[in-house]
């Protein structure tokens, strides 16, 4: 409870509230996941950068989902905003356990005032996997591929929602990281089961990520299966 | 500060103080690293087990250093005391990043009341490494080997300390996990440098662990280098 009392939340894409809260609590550490169910407004990101800088606060981008996906360097690259610290994980080593935090020397030197155990400091398998992941990401321009197959998926999901208004479902996220949000969450679970029976892993919640392995044909197959599954769900009621 | 206020420390191997503190704070979670610079007294371990059980507290053994080292199952096996929860790490996967916590279902089901992210849940390389580590630990009776070469090291260190009283140094720990503790910590650092120049990695603090790779000849070489290095350090003052 005491730790929770040290934190507050600011609403996504709300410039006025965010500005007011940062000024109220500064100097503070403002941790932002740059894409949450929607793209960030540039004005909101600009406010975060400006207010944190003006108040001696630290802006942290959690780029765990967005780096190597919406751009190699994530949201900071795509939306042109430089955080003070950035946090990487997940896609960084493509399945091997690795996370990273980095920023300018004056902030990173805070590590000198604490202690981090180094038990796994000589574990180099995940580091090697990360090097290879970054090499492939750049060489094969993975974010571009995700934008293309993700765009195909996203547009297909929008058409699906428009075709079945009775399902009360909408598309959340952005092409590279989107999913179907049902007003009745149970329907999402039923859809996942129906998709599994068709041989397709479809998450009921955020996000149904596209990957380098997905082709246009895979997306087409997925969209056809979704249409069939949603149609049958509605028939059965 | 608020989290620190939720904790207190009990002195190692002090039956009366430990008993009093557990009764004062119960129900509590009593986390014990079973070997800290010395072996635990059986009476102390018995008190911990008895008082935690009697007061509805949970006894947790941090077996991160002791499992696969002083016995396959660590201190609980060697000293015959069953904790409620046990924590494993380090040697568990022999360098691959893996840790584990386990205990009876009624305690582990507390996980249902919280949420643990599963990003790395499909990372199986470290799990495979752990299986192989455990297989080798059992097949080659690694703790027995560590007891033998560790015993050789421990006895040699004791002789070293006796031979150089002016170094004001003593042996801490137990044969499988021991080190030299100088009254003047700077001497420990100087000794490590001197050992490094002889091609031997010798830690200035806890612990200089023996491993399956160490032979009796390695230990003899190490002890000779230590004797030479300490002797020269004392000559130079």
Image (tube, coloured by chain):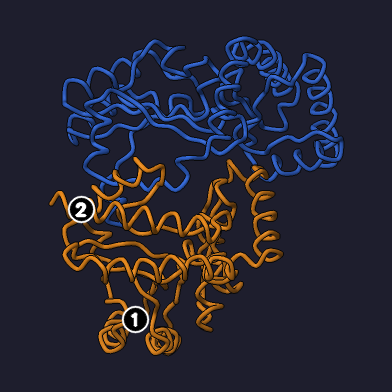
Chain colours: A orange, B blue
Q: Identify the residue position indicated by label 1 in the image.
A: A26
The residue lying at 59 percent from left, 52 percent from top is: A93
Residue B47, placed above or below residue A175:
above
Numbered disc 1: what chain?
A: A
Residue B127, placed above or below residue B7:
above
| Residue B223 on image: x %, y % | 79, 22
Q: Give a yes or no on whether discs 2 and 1 share a subunit.
A: yes
Q: Identify the residue position indicated by label 2 in the image.
A: A187
Q: Is residue B190 left or right of residue A183?
A: right
Numbered disc 2: what chain?
A: A
Q: Is residue B30 left or right of residue A122?
A: left
**Quarter placement of the N terminus of chain B:** bottom left
The residue lying at 70 percent from left, 18 percent from top is: B153
Q: Nearer the viewer, residue B38 or A86?
A: A86
Q: Is residue A10 left or right of residue B172?
A: left
| Residue A70 on image: x %, y % | 52, 70
Question: Pointer 2: residues within 10 angstroms few (<14), some, or many (20+)?
Answer: some
At mark 2, the secondary structure is helix
Q: Nearer the viewer, residue A133 or B7?
A: A133
Residue A98, placed above or below residue A159:
above
């Amino acid at each position: 409870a005491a730790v929770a009392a040290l934190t507050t939340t600011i609403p996504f894409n709300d410039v006025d509230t965010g500005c007011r809260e940062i000024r109220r609590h500064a100097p503070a550490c403002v941790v932002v996941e740059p894409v949450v169910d929607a793209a960030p407004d540039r004005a909101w990101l600009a406010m975060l950068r400006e207010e944190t800088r003006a108040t001696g606060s630290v802006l942290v981008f959690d780029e765990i989902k967005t780096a190597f996906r919406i751009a190699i360097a994530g949201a900071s690259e795509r939306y042109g905003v430089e955080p003070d610290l950035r946090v990487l994980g997940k896609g960084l080593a493509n399945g091997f356990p690795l996370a990273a935090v980095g920023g300018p020397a004056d902030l990173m030197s805070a590590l000198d005032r604490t202690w981090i155990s180094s038990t796994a400091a000589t574990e180099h398998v995940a580091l090697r996997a990360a090097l290879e992941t970054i090499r492939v990401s750049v060489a094969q321009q993975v974010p571009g591929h995700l934008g293309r197959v993700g765009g195909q998926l996203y547009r297909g999901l929008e058409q699906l929602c428009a075709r079945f208004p009775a399902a009360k479902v909408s598309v959340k996220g952005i092409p590279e990281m989107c999913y179907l949000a049902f007003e009745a969450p149970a329907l999402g679970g039923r859809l996942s089961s129906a998709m599994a029976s068709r041989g397709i892993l479809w998450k009921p919640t955020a996000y149904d990520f596209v990957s380098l392995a997905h082709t246009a044909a895979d997306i087409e197959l997925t969209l056809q299966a979704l249409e069939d599954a949603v149609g049958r769900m509605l028939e059965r009621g």
